[in-house]
Image: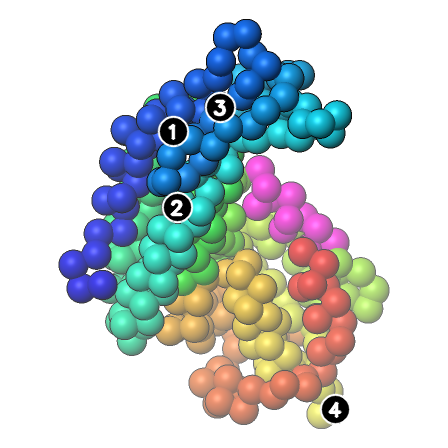
Amino acid sequence: MENYTPFGFYRIFLEKDIYLEFDKFYFYSDPPDILECYSDKNGVTIYTGNIIEIDTKNHIIKYTDYSEIKEISLEDSVNERLSIEIDKTIKYIEKGFEERLSNPTKVQLFGDFLRIGLKTIKESKAFNEFSFLSKYFSDIEEVINTYSIIKTDQNSSINNSVFSFILTLEDGVESIGMLSNLYNELITSPAIINCSKEEFINAFTGKEVNEGIYWLVVGKNKLTNKIALFYFIEKLIENRNLAKSYLLDLNKYVKYVFRDKEGKEFKNLKQSKSTISNNPTSKDRIDTIISSL
């Protein structure tokens, strides 16, 4: 895949191929007692029966075949070919990120490059005309967001002083809704965090935080349990709520966003992360909360 262009196939497909499939799909006899629809590269598949309904919005044709009601769709005509190419693209993207994981700048640049290509696809006439296409490209988008941080106009974490997190969700309304639910779960008694909802949302939308999020989980020594905090963040990454690229410099983000139970800045984060446990304090509670997102 050395010379593979991640979005080259889709430009041709969306500009030309999808419309060829469209024309073949709507080619049927008059009167419509025999339905003809392009099926595969070998030619035309003939469906015999009466057409009951033609859904021109979703491009679905319902017909009867020996008294049995069946349906065919434009999506059926392109699904196999498109799915194969989507799978190829995802493998290329994952390999590209993995090769760059040791360099945060290269990870972000690669993610930005891919988002530009994906944005061009989303702005195409065909993408907006055929609604079923969006689910195919959402798989690609999810992989990109899993590895790299989404930059927005309000994302100030690109400077040298603000290092708050940003969810992998690009939809701002959806992000706020998810963060509100997460916040409510975390402050439910016995509370895991202490901060205002506004501060919490700022901490996960790339904005500046002031007082920070107080982490209230304590260990047997009655001190703030930093290992549980790292477990919480890594579960968000594992659940694809945060990009994997945060793992490259996680201490920096945790130090900026979180405080100990007294509201003081964390110390010795590197040491705490190196002793990460698979069974930290409040593990079950954290697992339940993250899995509910």
Could you tell me if residue 268 is visible in this image? no
Q: Name the residue under label 1.
A: 21
Q: Name the residue under label 3.
A: 36
Q: Residue 102 carries which label?
A: none
Residue 274 lies within the magenta run:
no
Specify few, some or many for label 1: CA neighbours under 10 Å numbering under 14, 14-19, or 20 or more.
some
Q: In this view, does 239 lie to the left or right of 104?
A: right
In what element is the residue under mark 3? strand
Identify the amino acid type marked 4: Lys
Front: mark 4 or 3: 3
Specify few, some or many for label 4: CA neighbours under 10 Å numbering under 14, 14-19, or 20 or more.
few
Precedes in sequence: disc 2 or disc 1 = 1
Which residue occupies 67% across, 64% down?
290
Q: Which residue lies furthest to the left in this view?
A: 3
Measured as percent of width and height from the top left, residue 192 is found at: 72, 68
Q: Which residue lies furthest to the right in this view?
A: 189
Precedes in sequence: disc 1 or disc 4 = 1
Precedes in sequence: disc 1 or disc 3 = 1
Residue placed most toward the observer, 281 or 18: 18
Between the residue at mark 4 and the residue at mark 3, the CA separation in whole angstroms equals 72 Å
Q: What stretch is highlighted in magenta?
A: 173-184
Front: mark 1 or 4: 1
Measured as percent of width and height from the top left, residue 244 is found at: 44, 67
Between the residue at mark 2 and the residue at mark 4, the CA separation in whole angstroms equals 57 Å
Q: Name the residue under label 4.
A: 220
